[in-house]
Amino acid sequence: MIYLLEDDSGIRNFVLYALRSSGFEAEGFEAPSAFYTAMAERLPDLLLLDIMLPEEDGISILKKLRADGSTRKLPIILLTAKTTEFDKVTGLDSGADDYITKPFGAMELISRINALLRRAYGSDGGSRLTAGDITLIPSRHEVLRGEERLVLTLKEYELLAALMKEKGKVISRDELLSRVWGYDFTGESRTLDVHIRTLRAKLGESGGIIETVRGVGYRAGDGDD
């Protein structure tokens, strides 16, 4: 999945058409508020980000994404009409992986995207993680139960990924809170329990892959009794 945050409808429609014609799943947003809502539900594999936007400028959004542990390594390409060397350096220094100036052609855009995806995920697009009949695909930020794609919130996804990456190993509550909510998390530890409960519910009959180790934390297994 590729997200595009661009307020110009003409450019947005052009880019979405180019992406979908090249086989990518893509979704476009006109305003940052709609983009943030989508990010809370599903992380993309790559973000195309305009700089001049309503509500909030692209550089500010870029800095926020780089400061968040869940999106720190998200591949991001800036799309902008600003062409000075200073503007390019500012964008790259703020955390952008690449910078394309408007106007640009579809072939150049797709080539840049493919190159960045190869650098970010490797030629195989990233490894799959499995536990029981649950499959987690990090490069696509997708979770499957059999062939069915499950819709998880960002925190539910990150929690499941943290457990499945160390399948069979008990991860303490404090460690999970640090990994998923950040080392500066100051909320209640019940937050973790609530998310585990909702995650199990969304996994349905496969919810048993998340095992509770009383007094310690949680572990991902294959759900076998």
Image (cartoon, rainbow, N blue to C red):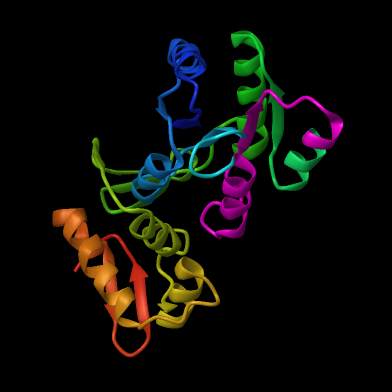
147 or 59, which lies in front? 59
Image quadrant occupied by the C terminus:
bottom left
Q: Residue at x 32, y 64 (%)?
A: 221
Q: Outermost residue, front direction? A: 54
Could you tell whether 173 is left or right of 58 in the image? left
Q: Residue placed at 45% from the left, 10% from the top?
A: 21
For the magenta stretch, what is the residue range?
58-87
Q: Position of residue 216 (x, y in %)?
A: 37, 86
Picture coordinates of residue 25, whole percent (x, y) = 40, 24
At 48% from the left and 13% from the top, the residue drawn is 10
Is residue 152 part of the magenta span, yes or no? no
Residue lying at the far bottom of the rendered structure: 215
The quarter of the rendered structure image containing the N terminus is top left
Q: Quadrant of residue 169?
A: bottom left
Q: Is residue 73 magenta?
A: yes
Q: Is residue 224 visible?
A: no
Return the x and y of residue 86 as percentages of the image width and height: 84, 36
224 or 12, nearer to the observer: 12
Q: Is residue 112 left or right of residue 28?
A: right
* Nearest the eye: 185 or 137: 185
Camera-side residue: 3 or 167? 3
In the rendering, at what x and y percent does residue 214 appear? 29, 87
Which of the 4 image quarters holds residue 222?
Answer: bottom left
Q: Is residue 25 left or right of residue 112?
A: left
Q: From where the camera sits, is residue 112 visible?
A: yes
Query: Farthest residue in the right direction?
Result: 85
